[in-house]
Structure formats: C-alpha cells, structure tokens
Amino acid sequence: MEAVPVAAVVGPTATGKTRLAVEIALRFSGEVVSADSMQIYRGLAVGTAKPTAAEMRGVPHHMVGCVGPEETFSVADYVSAASACIRGIRGRRRLPVVAGGTGLYIRALLRGIGFAPQGRDETLRAALRRKAEAQGPGALVEELRSFDPDSAERIDPHDVSRLIRAIELYRTTGLTMTEQNRRSRAVPPPYDVCMIGLTCRDRAKLYAAIDRRVDGMMERGLVREAEEVFRLPDRCTAKQAIGYKEFAPYFRGECTLAQAVETVKRESRRYAKRQLTWFRRDEGVHWIFLDELPSFGSVCERSFDLIRERRWRL
C-alpha cells in the first residue's frame, strides 16, 4: 500500500506552528490535524492557544476541542482519532497537515506506533499519583527503572502522567513500554511525512516570544480560565497543563498574581527546551530558523519548497 503523504509542522511553543500549517493547507488544499495534548479539551481556549476562527481562515481543523476537560484521553486514543481524521482528509483528496508541539503524539501518530489492547486501572493510577505527591516523581522513576530502565531514562523525570502510564502498562499487561515501542517500529510507518520544524537559532529570541505570548494570554483572560480549571477534580489531566497549574498557589493565597505569571513563563520556557530536545532526536525534521529569515512569507516559501520536493500526487 502506498504511504499517505502528510505535512507536519513541529517545534517548541510560540513559534507560529498553527499559522504556518494554515498557510500550507491553503496552498496545497489541505486540512489541519492538531497534535497538541491540551488543545483537544473543550473550553480551554486561552491557555492552550487554540486558533480562533479568524486564524483558521476557513481551513478545517481536527482534534481541537473534542474532549471534555474532565475526561481521560490517552496517546492511544489520540492516535486512533487522529488517524481517522487523516483517512477522511485523504478520502476527500486533500493534504493532511499535522501541527503541534506534543512530541509523543506526533511520533506515535506518524510512525504508526501500535498500542497493545489493555484496560486502564484507575485504582493503580490513583495510588501512583499519591506516591508521586508524597515522595516526589523520582519515586516513580525508580519503580519504572526496576523493570523498564530504558523508559526510565527516556521519559522526562517530571512528567508524572507518562511515568504513571509506563508503570500502568507493565502492571496490567506484563509488557514494558520499551518492548511495545520495539514491536511497533518493526511495522513500516503508514505515512510519507515532510516534517518541518520551527525554532530560533538564538534561544533568547525564542524565550522572549514565549514571554510575550504569556502576556497576551493574560490580556485575553488566562486567570479566569485557570480558575475554572482549578475547580476541576484532581484526576483531570487539564489540571496538570502548563499555564494552568502554576496559578494554583495564587488561588490558594500562597503567592501573588505576578509571581504566578512569572512561574508560567519560566515553566513555558523549560517546556520549550524539552520540546527542542525531543524533536532534535528526529533526523527527519527540516529545521527553519525564524530569526534567520526576513519575514514570515520567507518561512512559508521555504516550507512550500520542502513540500514540493516530495513530488506528491495531491
């Protein structure tokens, strides 16, 4: 079976991935599939930087606002739903344009990583989360290391949700995440991907863009949205999102609003650094440095050239 052509725009936060994805979709008759683990939730528009109708410019966007913030949504759920979106887009003879900064979503989707059928164990998950709260995430890292040292090294030691998922997978199926990934890589990926990465050569310019983005979110009502998230049950994944969880101390009266905003900026910069580390492991990414081109139009033209070089039959 011929691999399905897919354009993908990846990179750290605040680099204009959605904006470029829309331009690509307009030029090549495409539709956008979001690969952002927080944009999937309904009602969280400001903190997740969901594109507005004006920003979408009439281009259909999939995997945006499709899950309630109180619902659980796994990587396997994302891959299943996003794959169906891509099939539908190709069925309409249009180009799927995947855009986002959640590296795990992008890798699992575009490499065709399969997921072993397994049930969730909510009791185990709750126990592991309590363990992380009482002993710190390092306790989960050590537990994972006891049976899956490769995953313990690969997963961000502060990413409690992924640590819990790796432990849950093994405890419920006997299959480590490392073994599952190995089996998945043995199957050829279903897509022919042109992956475009956006970043800045000068890290200070990227961080300044992130700070400006947070300031803009504050003007658009981030605090009000964060307060709504704060009231959600603790089990909700949205409560752990950067841009929301940093306000919890403010709502509890433990810090000032200015301190909370500064924490959002700091954690967003740290997240961008982790995103860059993740995507730079992929040799297939064509990097475009925003601070080395004169305009956004130049970024678009460079991206269009990369896609044309694939000589896809669109």
Image: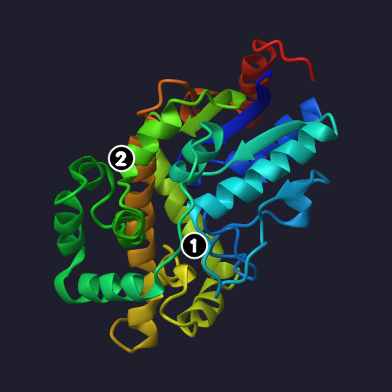
Instruction: Indicate left or right for 263 with 30 as reference.
Output: left
- Disc marking residue 135: none
Residue 250 horizontal/vertical position (percent): 36, 82
Instruction: Indicate left or right for 153 with 116 as reference.
Output: left
Dot 1 or dot 2: first in sequence order is 2
Instruction: Indicate left or right for 270 with 140 as reference.
Output: right
Q: Residue at x 35, y 76 (%)?
A: 123
- Disc marking residue 178: 2
Q: Is residue 15 above or below residue 283?
A: below
The residue indicated by pointer 1 is 215
**Callout 2: SS:** helix
Is 219 or 134 nearer to us in this picture? Answer: 134
Q: CA distance from mark 1 to mark 2?
A: 40 Å
Q: Residue at x 71, y 49 (%)?
A: 62
Is 123 or 45 nearer to us in this picture? Answer: 123
Q: Is residue 18 above or below residue 241?
A: above
